[in-house]
Amino acid sequence: MCGIVGYVGEKLGLPIVIDCLTRLEYRGYDSSGVAYVDNEDLVVKKQLGKLNNLSSNLKNKIIPASCAIGHTRWATHGEPSIQNAHPQQDENKLLALVHNGIIENFNNHKQKLIGKGVKFTSQTDTEVIAQLLGRELQKVLNTGDNYSQNKMHSTMHSTSSLTKKQVLRAIHNVINSLDGAFAFAVVVKGMDDCIFFAKFKSPLILGKGIDENFLSSDATAILPYTNKIYSLMDGEFGYIDKKKIEVFNSSFKPVKVKFESLQIEPEQIMLGDYQHFMHKEIEQGAESVINTLDRLSSELQNLPNGIFLNDFNLHIVACGTALHAGRVGKYIIENQLRIPVNVDYASEFRYKNPILDNKSVCLFISQSGETADTLSSLELAKQKGAVTIAITNVPASRIEKIADYCIHTSAGPEIAVASTKAYLAQLAALYAFAEHIAKLRGIEISFSIKKIKTEVMRFSKFTYRDKLGDIVKDIKEQESVYFVGRGLDYILALESALKLKEISYIHCEAFPLGELKHGSLALINRESVVIAILTQKDLIEKTLNGIHELNSRGAKIILFSPFEELKDNVYKFIKTPLVDDCLSPFVVIKPLQILAYLTSLSKGLDPDKPRNLAKSVTVE
Ligand code: G6P
C-alpha cells in the first residue's frame, strides 16, 4: 500500500509529482505529502485525507523546485494524521523520505535510537528509516567522509558538501539493517538535483525521459511523461538526476539498467468521458475478456503440460475478488473436467500448513501481482515443491518474478479500488486454462473460447443504468442487503455482495440459498431486501423453493435472471442475458457491478476510492 513518486528535471517538479500521485491514489488516500529542495531549503507539505486537499492547498503557488518527491498513504503504523503522513524526516531535517512497505524490525531500531536520545515525532515505521539515514549523513558531516577519497568539511548544519556517493553509502548501510519490505525515495537538503531510492519487496520503477527522470510505485503513474521503464530488483538502490540514472545491487556493484518501452496508451489511464474509473472499467469488461483470450495461448503452451496428463492436485489461492474468480474456476474445472480443486484465501492458506508436494499445481491469482498474502502463499508453495503458476494483470510484477510460470490477463490498467474488468479477465484466463487441460486430456467440454468471445461481445452494449435506478432506491437506505443463489449463482452472489459492500458501506452478505433455513433465515423480516441470482436452468425449481420461503417471511426479493417467466414470483425483476449455463458468470456480473456503482453514487460516495481500502494490499 502507499504510492510514492519522484521527479527531477528541467520543469517545475511539484505539479508533475501531484499529477502522478493522482494515478497512485488507488494505493491509499488517508493522507498525502510532498517534499522538494528549494535552493538550500528542504520543504515538506502534508495534508490529511485525499490528494485533493493537498493539491488545492498548493494550487496557485508557483514553486520553482525541479526536484520533488510525493506520497499517498494507506495507514499501517499510526493513525492517519499530519504527523504520520509522509514525507518523514530525521530529527536534524537533513532529508525527507517517502516509503511504501513495512519495516518489521522498526521497533528495535526505534528503541535503540530513543536510547541514544533521538526524538521521534510520528508513530510510523518509516520515520525509523529517515532517522537512521539522517544519523548516517550526520556522521559523515561531523567526522568527514569515511568512505570517499574526497576530503569533507565538517559541519553540523549544511549538507551542501555531501556527495552522491556518500549518500549512497549511507543508504546502503541503512538498508542492510532493515527487515521487511520497502521502496523509498529521499531528497537531501542542499542537493536540489537528485533523488535517492532503494527497493526491497515493495515495487519501484524508474522512468527515463529527456532531461528528466522519474521514479514511481507503478508505471501508470508516470506514463503521460514517459513509457521507458526499468523495474528495480530487490536490493537495488541508487539515484536519479535529470541526465543520469545510477543503480547499484546489494553488494554496491553498479547495475546495467535496461529500459523497456511500456505498451500502454495514456488514454487507458485517463477517465475520458466517464465520471469514475469504476464505471469506465465495468464498461471495458468485454474488451478485457477478449484481449485476455486473444493473448494467452502461447503462455498456456509454455506450462509444464506433462503434469496435467497424470494425477495432480490443483489449488487456487487468492484474495478478494480474485478469490471469487478462483471459485468460479474451481466450479468449472470440477464440473467439466472432473478434476478436484481446492480454493483458499491466501491469508488462510499460508498458515494452515497446506498439503503440497511435487504433484501439486498451485494457481495464484492477483490483479496487481503484489498482494502480500498471495505472494507469501506462493513462496510457501514453492518451498514445498509445488508447481506454481501466477495469473496476473501487471506484467513484470512481483508475482510473475516469483512464480514458475505466468499467465497474463489483459484487462489493461485497473484503477478503481473495486475490481471489475480484472475479475472478468481472471475468469477468461481460468476458462482458457480449463479448456487447455481438457484438450491435453482429450476431455469434451461444453464451452469454447470462441463462444465466450461471441457472448461477451453480444451483450457488451447493455448499460442497465435506467433499469437499476429503481432498485437503488430500494437498497440505498438498507442496513443490510442479502444475496442468494445456488451453485455458480452463489459464487456470483459472493462477488456481487463484495462489490456492493465495499463501495456503498451497506452490510452485504451472500448465502447459498439452500442454507438459509439453517440459521440465516432468522435475519429475514418484512424490511429485508434480498437479491437473488438465478441463471442455471436445472436449478430453477430448487431456487424457486428458496424464493418462496423468503417471500413467506415478507422479504422483498429482487431477482436477477434471464428467465422472465419467473418475474411474478418476486418483488422486482432484472432481466439478464440468456447464455449457456456455464458462461453466465461472464454476463450476469455487469448489472450487479452497475448496481453497486449506482448505489455508491446515490449515497454521495466516491466509488473509486472507498474508505479504509486500497487496491494493492502489500501488507499482511
Ligand atoms: C484488494 C482490492 C480488491 C482485490 C484484492 C486482491 O482488496 O481492493 O479489489 O480483489 O485486493 O487484489 P489482487 O491485486 O491480488 O487481485
Image (cartoon, rainbow, N blue to C red):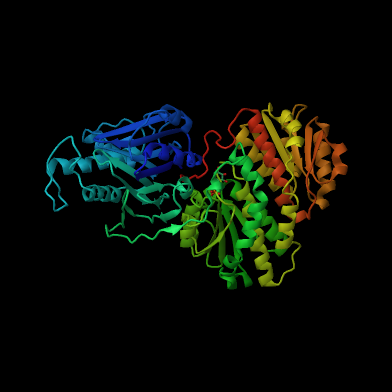
Residue positioned 78% across, 31% down in the render: 555
Count of labels shown?
Answer: 0
Residue 167 pos. (x, y %)? 24, 47
Evaluate whether residue 220 shows in this view.
yes
Q: Quadrant of residue 19?
A: top left
Residue positioned 36% across, 29% down in the render: 83
191 to the left or right of 217: left
Residue 163 drawn above or below residue 379: above
416 to the left or right of 47: right
Evaluate whether residue 506 shows in this view.
no
Residue positioned 75% across, 26% down in the render: 527
Residue 126 drawn above or below residue 247: above
Residue 394 pos. (x, y %)? 52, 54
Q: Quadrant of residue 604?
A: top right
Query: Front-most of 304 and 517?
Result: 304
103 to the left or right of 173: right
Residue 541 pos. (x, y %)? 85, 47
313 to the left or right of 536: left
Residue 154 pos. (x, y %)? 12, 40
Residue positioned 71% across, 31% down in the render: 472
